[in-house]
Amino acid sequence: MENFISNDWLTIATLAIQAGILKFAYNLYKNFIQKEANRDCAIRGLLRVEIINICHNAEKEGFLPIWALENLTDMYNTYKALGGNGAITGLYNKTIQLPQRKEEG
């Protein structure tokens, strides 16, 4: 055993350094994934608030401007792609059924 260590000390040291580098890289990757998941949750939350805002304003006004419909659809699709739940779907579907402009008279 002593002969093995004295003959292959460089190989053992290289393996130890490689293991340390791999652990460091894994920790960096793990932190990156966690930050990305947190960022997705934050973006999803902000989208949810804005979707609810647009829907309530449209319901209050009785119509949905075309620009708001485009924004709402883009935000809803992104919200769903980020793993948003179905609670917003009913509100979204109800809102897109509103007229595109305020009816005169």
Image (spheres, rainbow, N blue to C red):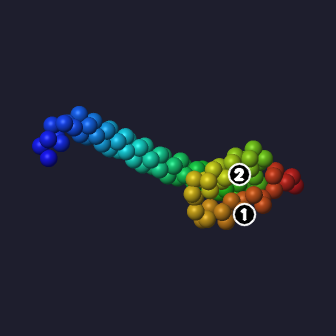
Q: Position of residue 4 (x, y in %)?
A: 18, 42
Q: Residue 30 or 74: which is nearer the viewer?
A: 30
| Residue at 69% over, 48% down | 74
Lateral position of residue 18 relative to residue 4, left or right: right
In the rendered image, is residue 13 in sight? no
Q: State the image quarter where residue 25 is shown.
A: top left
| Residue at 74% over, 50% down | 69
Q: Residue 104 or 19: which is nearer the viewer?
A: 19
Q: Position of residue 87 (x, y in %)?
A: 60, 65
Lateral position of residue 70 relative to residue 14, left or right: right
Q: Is residue 67 above or below residue 81?
A: above
Q: Which residue is mark 2?
A: 73
Regarding mark 2 in the picture, which secondary structure is present there? helix
- The dot on residue 94 is 1
Q: Amino acid at mark 2?
A: Thr
Q: Position of residue 82 (x, y in %)?
A: 57, 53
Lateral position of residue 52 relative to residue 102, left or right: left
Most extreme residue toward the top is 10
Q: Amino acid at mark 1?
A: Lys
Regarding mark 1 in the picture, which secondary structure is present there? helix
Q: Residues within 10 Å of mark 1 (few under 14, many from 20)?
A: few
In the rendered image, is residue 58 in sight? yes
- The dot on residue 22 is none
Q: Which label's residue is closer to the chain start, 1 or 2?
A: 2
Q: Is residue 100 above or below residue 2?
A: below
Distance in Å between CA atoms under marks 1 and 2: 12 Å
| Residue at 74% over, 47% down | 70
Q: Is residue 2 above or below residue 85?
A: above
| Residue at 52% over, 52% down | 45
Most extreme residue toward the left is 2
Pair 1/2: label in front: 2
Q: Position of residue 32 (x, y in %)?
A: 43, 43
